[in-house]
Image: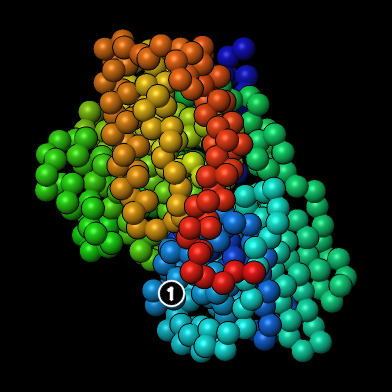
Amino acid sequence: MSGCQYKKEFFKILEEELVPAQGCTEPISLAFAGAKARELLGEIPDKVIIECSGNLIKNIRCVTVPNTGNLVGVEASLIAGIVGGDSSKELEVISNLNEKHIVQIHEILKKDIVTIKLLQTPLNLHYILYCEKGEKHCEIEIKDLHTNIVSIKLNNEVLFEKESGNEEFCGVETDRSVLTVERIVQFTNSVDFKKLKTLLEPQVYYNMAIAKTGLERDFGVSIGQTILKHIHSIYGEIKAYTAAASEARMSGCAMAVITNSGSGNQGLATSIPVILYAKHKCVSEEIMYRALVLSNLLTLYQKSFIGRLSAFCGAISAAISSGATLTYIEGGTVEQIKMTIVNALANVSGVICDGAKPSCASKIVTGLEAGILGHFLAMDNHSYNPNSGILKTTVDDTIHAVGTMAREGMKETDRVILNLMLEKEKVG
């Protein structure tokens, strides 16, 4: 069956996933719930209890929350949302914070009203927020997706309740069983260009804007500027711009990005290399947008088996997708696109996620290096042999195998990483 027959399903997946977010999506998720809690109570609570899955704590611990005066951590994320968040803005919930809000956030943080507990759950993205003010109290539960509220209670009354998402594909709302590399390429080549442009224009605008800001200002270790200083080629630009964008948002830059698989970094690594390479090769606008949808769908396909959060660095999946899309832009065949993915997965399937932070940018560079090398090999018609190591007979089986390794095989790795990160802290 051709990709044309899945246009409706593919668009539903893309519309669910390509959404704007300001700041790292894990702290912003807590801010979203905090804003919702304040809206329910009608005032700022004086007692807050948050029970979080380990992966959430891992990804919130070290990343700067935008518009808060460089605050980091679970408490700052929650209080920022409670004080000045607007839940209707979802992952841009704290975009309207101002100086008065920042002062108030700092004052509340001094009162130490937040208790953090480790939630015993099989899910990697799962938390329960309890807020209390006088005799009023509310509880909000979120699972699988960053703004996916599954339960709301006010004074013990259930106001809202729904079932979790698709368990096979890690809780997402849309069916991912239609995705294969072959169908994704067929969809890429046949879909209406105008619809693609409407869907993907924000990704080009937002993600390139933060990349340029990341290169113009000093964030983290200024990895983008360093790469440009030493690597003078389009491949150096690809790595520099993408890493600079990531470093900026991990360091608290308040500019929004278009996400992929619930991650801004994955959205950046999926899109910026493709945009830059398309412009470098002077291809038409249509080819650039078709390349972008290919890269986005390849990332979504890989992440469908891994899940939103895991011990496997998701930016690697996104960077591999970009590498495969360079092959597409160069006129590579479907087989060469598959070979690019296999070559890259044979290389960097073991990069761990030890939480969101500025050094995520360097992992993106590592992923892009693997993706670019995979592309070079594929264009010379070289590919690693199937059934060697984790590689399977087909690219789809290999993607599934890597997902199983990341989701199931790396659970103990995830636990050890979290314990190492928190061994000097008190989390109940």
Image quarter of the N terminus: top right
Q: Where in the figure is residue 222, as x and y percent of width and height?
A: 22, 57
Q: Which residue is mark 1?
A: 71
Amino acid type of the residue that numbered disc 1 sits on in the rendered structure: Leu
Residue in the foreground of this view, choosing between 257 and 196: 257
Q: Where in the figure is residue 238, as x and y percent of width and height?
A: 26, 40
Q: Name the residue at 35% across, 45% down.
A: 363
Query: Can residue 106 be seen in this snapshot?
Result: yes
- Vertical side of 189 occupied by 126: above or below: below
Horizontally, residue 134 falls left or right of residue 206, namely right
Question: How many numbered dots are placed on residues in this image?
Answer: 1
- Vertical side of 121 occupied by 32: above or below: below
Query: Can residue 286 be seen in this snapshot?
Result: no
Q: Which residue reaches farthest right?
A: 157
Q: Quadrant of residue 17?
A: top right
Q: Name the residue at 81% across, 68% down.
A: 153
Q: Name the residue at 75% across, 56% down.
A: 150
Q: Where in the figure is residue 129, as x and y percent of width and height?
A: 69, 68
- Vertical side of 43 occupied by 332: above or below: above
Residue in the foreground of this view, choosing between 241 and 208: 241
- Vertical side of 197 occupied by 126: above or below: below
Looking at the rendered structure, the secondary structure element under dot 1 is loop
Image quarter of the C terminus: bottom right
Q: Where in the figure is residue 95, as x and y percent of width and height?
A: 48, 69
